[in-house]
Amino acid sequence: MAAQTVASTTNTVTSPDSAPSVDLGPAAALSCRECGHRVPLGPVFACEECFGPLEIAYDFSAYDTEELRKRIEAGPANIWRYAPLLPVPADVADKPNINPGWTKLVQADNLARELGVTGGLYVKDDSGNPTHSFKDRVVAQALEAARAFGFTTLSCSSTGNLAGAVGAAAARAGLRSCVFIPHDLEQGKVVMAAVYGGELVGIEGNYDDVNRFCSELIGDPAGEGWGFVNVNLRPYYAEGSKTLAYEICEQLGWRLPDQLVVPIASGSQLTKIDKGLKELIELGLVEDRPYKIFGAQAEGCSPVSVAYKAGHDVVRPQKPDTIAKSLAIGNPADGPYVLDIARRTGGAVEDVNDEQIVDAIKLLARTEGIFAETAGGVTVGVTRKLIENGLLDPSLTTVVLNTGDGLKTLDAVASDTGLTATIRPSLDSFREAGLGS
Amino acid sequence: MSVNVRIPTILRTYTAGRAEVAAEGGTLAEVIADLEKNHTGIAARVLDDQGKLRRFVNVYVNDDDVRFEQGLETATPDGAGVSIIPAVAGG
């Protein structure tokens, strides 16, 4: 088959504007998603013309589809099998890195029966990553960019999962880490971030306050030499979410799912999953056919869902109040793009309340043996609601994302989950409790 | 009213590299107009063609996001700190 040239819809190029000064594989330049202004690869994230987000523009022009497919299939069982499609050097798999990805795509037949899904239901279970959330995927990209730009400290603003992923990646790479979190995070997440030995700083405020602080630190001499994975390295970091799309399609036998249900915090993950699917189509790795992307939020932080239902193009920020803290971003920077994608693909954006989130966590655990963090409760809960509302077609192949491990948010289910009975160590006591067969 | 405005890195070409500049005005709109007077071109970076705050710009007066206040009509008391920050995402 002839070499495929990826079209401009995925922000790619056939030839770089100028040779990049750093080796980040097929990454050719940074391009503004809003106005198209282009700048060389560097640690910048906002367009100097319009403040719009900068994205990686690629040169995929040399790839032959079948050779690329073989190369991917022969690659390591982690995200680096997709290195030809990521902003990383070709030898990335040889460097010290926590090597995330290639997590299980669980065929969820029991959950499908409960929800009335007949077309095939799958859970992409990213709790299987090294620090038990999808954040390892994005941090791995940012780490390569940090190396390329010579940063010596890896940092981030975080709702918890990212803090752990940065701490672990920096530890393996031998870099200093210093990360910032809201001071009132779940204890489990604090421990899982602090254990890697980096510096962990609680900020008196919510995630949006932490994010604002980090943005200001970047412009200050105190933050010089710091690579903030989700701020000044964000264009590189965000690309890691494309690997979810790649893996889902490859695990389905190089086939697009009909429907995906994706959680929304900043909206970055959902937009990059869409980008990844479009790349696979344009590279000829999957058949071009329609797919729908559905966004899932918690009612207590639902700015994108509210805007979707109101028919708005702009997202009005909210003050978050939900147990789904990993999704508690009240001012989601990629919210408008999520609205575009949900509408373009024929999907929707929906939200569920805290009680429904807990019910969904238990439902997934009870039916499939997967203990999801609250974000997974949001996607499963929203899937159920979308089916009830007739917005998600149960006769089509559907993939639901679980982006983190339930051990990170034990508090959410601890209050009404516990012992069935307490008995004496005797058979009589066992029988009296009605536990025998 | 005199306020201190924190300038993000990508706008410092308009302020001769300075990270913080002084400006006058009783509302955010007046402060931006005063910034434009002394640092020509900066307003068009912060405001869109309709004169509204650009979608990917966040502005804080002291610690308050002006989108939760009165937007460009948010009061800027004497001595207030105004921060202009590109919107970023993460989690």
Image (spheres, coloured by chain):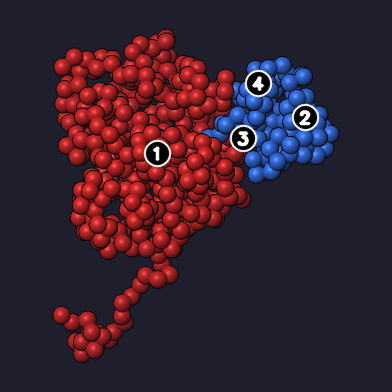
User: Residue lying farthest top?
Assistant: A18
* Element class at badge 3: strand
Picture residue at 33% right of the left edge, 23% below the top:
A89
Q: Amino acid at mark 2?
A: Glu
- Residues marked 3 and 4 touching at CB (< 8 Å): no
What shade has chain A been given?
red
Residue in the foreground of this view, choosing between A119 and A141: A119
On residue B44, which mark appears?
Answer: 4
Please state which of the two labelled residues, at mark 1 or mark 3, is closer to the viewer.
Answer: 1
Q: Colour of chain B?
A: blue
Q: Residue at x 35, y 48 (%)?
A: A391
Is A354 located above or below residue A249 in the figure? below
| Observer able to see residue A32 | yes
Residue mark closest to the camera, 3 vs 4: 4
Which residue carries the number 3 mark? B58
User: The residue marked by circle 4 belongs to what chain?
Assistant: B
Residue B51 pos. (x, y %): 67, 26
Q: Is label 4 in a helix, a strand or a loop?
A: helix
Name the residue carrying label 1. Answer: A342
Q: CA distance from mark 1 to mark 3?
A: 25 Å
Q: Chain of mark 2?
A: B
Spatial CA distance of label 3 from label 4 is 15 Å
Taking the image as shown, residue A289 lies to the left or right of residue A314, namely left
